[in-house]
Amino acid sequence: MSIITQIAQGAKKAAHVLSVLDEGVKNNVLRDMAKAIRENSDSIIAVNEREVARAKDNHLDAAMIDRLILNRDRVESMAAGLEMVADLPDPVGAIRELGVRPNGIKIQKMRIPLGVVCMIYEARPNVTADAGALCFKSGNAVILRGGKEALDTSLAIAEIMQKVLVKHDLPQELISVVPDPDRGLLQELMCQRDYIDVIIPRGGEGLINYVTDNAKVPVIQHFKGVCHLYVDSDANIEKALGLLLNGKTQRTGVCNALEGLIVHKDIAPSFLPLAAQALEEHQVKIHVNQSGAEYFTNADVIAEDAFGEEYLGLEIAVRVVDSFDEAILHIATFGSNHTEVICTENTDKASYFQRAVDASVVMVNASSRFSDGSELGLGAEIGIATTKLHAYGPMGLESLTAEKYLVCGEGQVRE
């Protein structure tokens, strides 16, 4: 039996234990995991520093390295995320009443775990803790297959969490890490449909496409984040500048960073000179359509069909539009169904924008950087789904469950 089959079988068996585990026990385990991660912070960082050094020697791009780094603040954030998950209500076992049929049978739906979740991700070692915690609380076993760049850090984090599981007399197979990044093992993992219920890939567009094209297990897709800020003709300029700078420069290598700025022509003369100066101070490279080129120096003038890039760096595409409807059309054409933001003081436009724009998160006068599970009250997140099956947007506990029907009668038979 191959190592992949062993891991998958072990996870499937362990998941049965977790599906009926008491919520209080789960919460105690998660808090102990958070404590253990804090106590082992120095060792986690030491392992991670070696991996970061290798990544730099191998000339990985800046966005990938940023995702790979675990400093003291990020380790603390991992631990705090586990505690946040422990504090959240457990969705497993929740009952939804659907009523009583004319023949007297009672219909309900109950939330249940998905079973075994497989996470396939690139240089994001924090996913090990986030996914482990979310899957554990929602009653799922999880198999983690990280990229080679972060494998040692992921193994170190998983080992800490596994020791806590064993301490509580739970199978360590509830949180498993594939210990070898070999591509052949990945292909085998994606074919384990007898044991794995869903695969969630998290990383670059190439990884998502590869998993989607090759998996024989259902895939929840988390494609790229081409997020826009639309500055409406009724926008508050001070708010718009704040949203632009926070969305573009606070952290560039993440999927909820801004990649596009759309500006209504009526506000462009007053807003864009200020935006151009602020972006220049942050050394942001500008790609702009011809209508907006006059507001920038040394900008790259691009064609009207050349938008939609995910830069993951200090670059942004700017387009001046003639109307509110043109802004919505631009988003429909070049967005990635991730996160879209409007800055406006017109409540009717804001409401219409939120209804009309097809994205998993649509914001009014708030930074795109809030499109994150922890910021939206989910604790941690397992990713941001940009397709509508089985979830849409940041995936927290409830997104890691399904529902089954409960039918209760008193001997009724169908005629």
Image: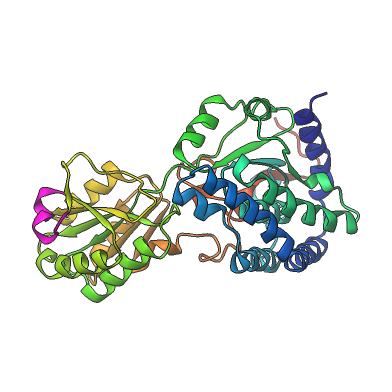
Instruction: Name which quarter of the figure residue 79 lies in.
Output: bottom right
Residue 175 horizontal/vertical position (percent) = 76, 47
Count of picture labels: 0
* Residue 236 in view here: no
- The answer to whether 63 appears left or right of 281 in the picture is right
Which residue does the image show at 75% across and 43% down from the upper left? 176
Name the quadrant of the C terminus: top right
Within the magenta stretch, is there residue 295? yes
In the depicted view, which residue is nearer to us: 191 or 1?
1
Residue 129 horizontal/vertical position (percent) = 68, 55
User: What span is colored magenta in the figure?
Assistant: 289-298
In the depicted view, which residue is nearer to us: 323 or 209?
209
Residue 301 horizontal/vertical position (percent) = 15, 47
- The correct choice, above or below, for 370 with respect to 336 in the image is below
Which residue does the image show at 82% across and 59% down from the upper left? 22
Dominant secondary-structure state across the stretch colored magenta: helix
- The answer to whether 207 appears left or right of 90 in the picture is left
- The correct choice, above or below, for 104 with respect to 188 in the image is below
- The answer to whether 356 appears left or right of 19 in the picture is left
Q: Work out which residue is located at the far front of the displayed protein and give it.
A: 57
Name the quadrant of the N terminus: top right
Within the magenta stretch, is there residue 403? no
Which residue does the image show at 12% across and 70% down from the upper left? 270
| Snapshot colouring | rainbow
* Residue 126 in view here: yes
Instruction: Name which quarter of the figure residue 363 lies in.
Output: bottom left
Residue 338 horizontal/vertical position (percent) = 41, 50
In the depicted view, which residue is nearer to us: 142 or 346?
142
Which residue does the image show at 59% across and 27% down from the upper left? 215
